[in-house]
Amino acid sequence: MIKQNISYTKSQLCVLLALRFLVGWHILYEGISKVLNPQWSSYSFLNESQWILSGISKWIISNPNILMLVDAVNIWTLILVGAFLILGFLFKPSAIIGSLLLLTYYLNAPPLLGLEYSIPMDGSNLIVNKTLIESVVLVLLVLFPTNKVFGIDYFIFRKTVKD
Amino acid sequence: MDKQGNESNHSKKNNKDVSLDDMNLGSKSISRRNMLKALAGVPVAGLLGFNLWRKIDFDKEKELRTLKELGLHELQNQKTYCHKVGEAHITIGIIGFGNRGRALAQGLGFLHPKEIEKRKKNNTFKSLEQQGDLNVSIVGICDVFDLHAQRGLETANSNLWHKSNHSVKRYLTYQEMLSDKDIDAVIIATPDHHHARMAIDAIKAGKHVYLEKTIAHTEDELNELYDVVKNSNVVFQLGHQITQSTTFKQAKEIIDKGVLGKITLVEATTNRNTPEGAWIRHLDSNGNPKPGNEDEIDWKQWLGQTPYVPFSIDRFYNWTKWFAYDTGMIGQLFTHEFDAVNQLLRIGIPKTVSSSGGIYYWKDNREIPDSLHCILEYPDRDLTMLYSANLASSRKRGRVFMGHDASMELGNTIRIMIDNNSTRYKSSIQKGLIDTSSPVISFDPNVGQIDALTSATAKYYADRGLTNTVINGKEVDVTHLHLREWLTCIRENRMPSSNIDIGYEIGITSLMAHRSYIEKRQVSWDEKNKRIV
């Protein structure tokens, strides 16, 4: 069980904060880059979906309106989660949502034996890829929080405790 | 981690520890120190924002520099798509209401009620709504097949925009339709062996004509049609709609600006690998023959001037397979490829054409080849056009314009690769300003603007090809645009893009390619006597 009275060594704190900022940065920029690129659509990615989520992905791309909605939700989730991770605002729900989003990406295109994708993947992967690792990192950041001191959540939780 | 972890153990704290418990969560006032700590993420966000701004600036500058380098920084924006049409109401008769007839009716804004329902259900109705009302009525349908004619009548009564004030009539022969004074214009979408004769008769009857390709089945017919159109006041449009696509217009501008340098070779291809694509279309999805028998089909009229053969459902649906009715891939597919190249480069009729090929895969009763290759030579233009078609492999080979300085692949998108040995871009390549390993420009009509230096992933998204084009973010059927242009030209007495001169060039070139295949020799164009020799 996590309590507020956790203590870290300075180096542990530094690494946790760095990890939080780096993951937040990455996720935020992923979202922003999609806003900046009007060509972007999740179509190609979902079209490649091969594992347990392939059914729902095919359904999404078969319907232009649903696809547009999914694209918008995806982009803005990335932006909000990324920004909130950096700022330490509503940190816990943001990190959990971010972790689930990344897990969804992973489950759509896991590098499993026998599954091949025509879109080039980043690096060489077998079962584990960077998306899965980043998803787990977000869970780790929830378990080792820094937001209530080094984050806007400080103002929220300060009041809660005070009252 | 295991030493500290999530365990709250105050006794383990020493001076170097930073306790999150010490942060005065319960204190009444916020100290400056805590405030600063709480806002630790703000400078990180600021840093990202600053770098983002720099990146956007950098990308813009790099893109502009590349476009300037290529001389493309002042590309015209595409014309806007305006919903306004002329006030004059035009009455139309459609001759031939098979698949293509239906597509053309749809382009005019007429769709069978069942089809409307189906499209609304699967959410594909929206693109039709972009079309807008063309202020026309379909008042006559002529088809030798009762079933098609009936469908035509039901479709003609179902306009997307307005209730028709005109009644729709079925004509048993096209001559009957042409003698009807209430019809202003006709669309001809029959099998190819009827095209030229019907068009000639229609023009003589004073009707404006939209003729599906191919324009003519013989040289004599083509010459007659050419003369008849030239001596008339009607507006003639050939059904080669590729020029209406936004991508095509952009490609024309790129070529006109000389970005590719001297173009000496153009390669166009057809790559299909299905029975449907090889014109085996007389069976339904369950493998049963499609409807139609001699009682419902006026077979004699369908055969027209061609030699008599007993009724055959195979011939009725798959007429492309026989030379009596069509020239196969030349008539159906090469014409589109040639039209695209011709309208971009204005190459006209080639000096010589050599065709070869054979029936290598679909060994049924067909006469037309399923593997066909045509070489068109333009010595006066220092240019060769290659056309290679195969009906037993769908590997994409694209349509490529090869210039000394760059090559352009033109499909639903445009991709330009700078040549490694280009003279014009030599210094830019050496300075690293231009990368020759990936497309330097790609144009996606979904965006409507030139996008230099696209990322590898962006290129994948650009591949979603449709028969529709996008104008100002709106998806529009190119057939609709081609029909719209024809109607506008009728109202304003102007010349459409696929006019008789263009049609003549396509017609002669196709007939040259066909004759070369049949006669197994190279054929030439006698410019002086206007004859194929």
Image (spheres, rainbow, N blue to C red):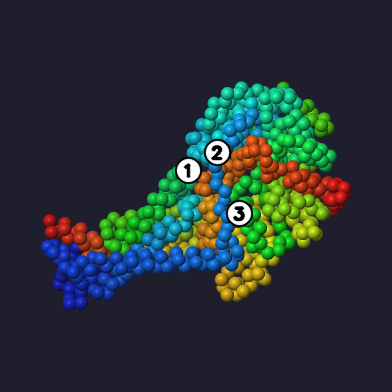
Q: Which mark is residue B84?
A: 2
Of circles 1 and 3, the one toward us is 3
Distance between mark 1 and mark 3 Cα atoms: 29 Å
Which one is nearer the viewer's eye here, B148 or B8?
B148
Judged from the image, the secondary structure of the residue bearing numbered disc 1 is: loop
Q: Quadrant of residue B480?
A: top right
Query: In the rendered image, which quarter contains the N terminus of chain B?
Result: bottom left
Instruction: Tell me the residue at 73%/31% (across/down).
Output: B206
Residues at marks 1 and 3, common chain? no
Marks 2 and 3 close (CB-CB < 8 Å): no
Instruction: Tell me the residue at 54%/55% (across/down).
Output: B449
Q: Which residue is mark 1?
A: A63
Task: For label 3, count other residues whose C-alpha is less than 10 Å away and answer few (under 14), some (14-19) or many (20+).
Answer: many
Judge left or right: residue B77 versus residue A130.
Answer: right
Judge left or right: residue A130 versus residue A140.
Answer: right
Distance between mark 2 and mark 3 Cα atoms: 24 Å
Q: Which mark is residue B196?
A: none
The answer to whether residue B136 is above or below residue B458 is above
Q: Chain of mark 2?
A: B
Q: Quadrant of residue B197?
A: top right
Q: Earlier in the sequence, mark 2 or mark 3?
A: 2
x, y percent for residue A120: 52, 61
> What amino acid is at disc 3?
Gln
Distance between mark 2 and mark 1 Cα atoms: 30 Å
Of circles 2 and 3, the one toward us is 2
x, y percent for residue B455: 52, 62
Q: Which residue is mark 3?
A: B250
Judge left or right: residue B451 versus residue B505.
Answer: left
Q: Chain of mark 1?
A: A
Q: Quadrant of residue B13?
A: bottom left
x, y percent for residue B116: 53, 32
Task: For label 1, count other residues whose C-alpha is less than 10 Å away and answer few (under 14), some (14-19) or many (20+).
Answer: few
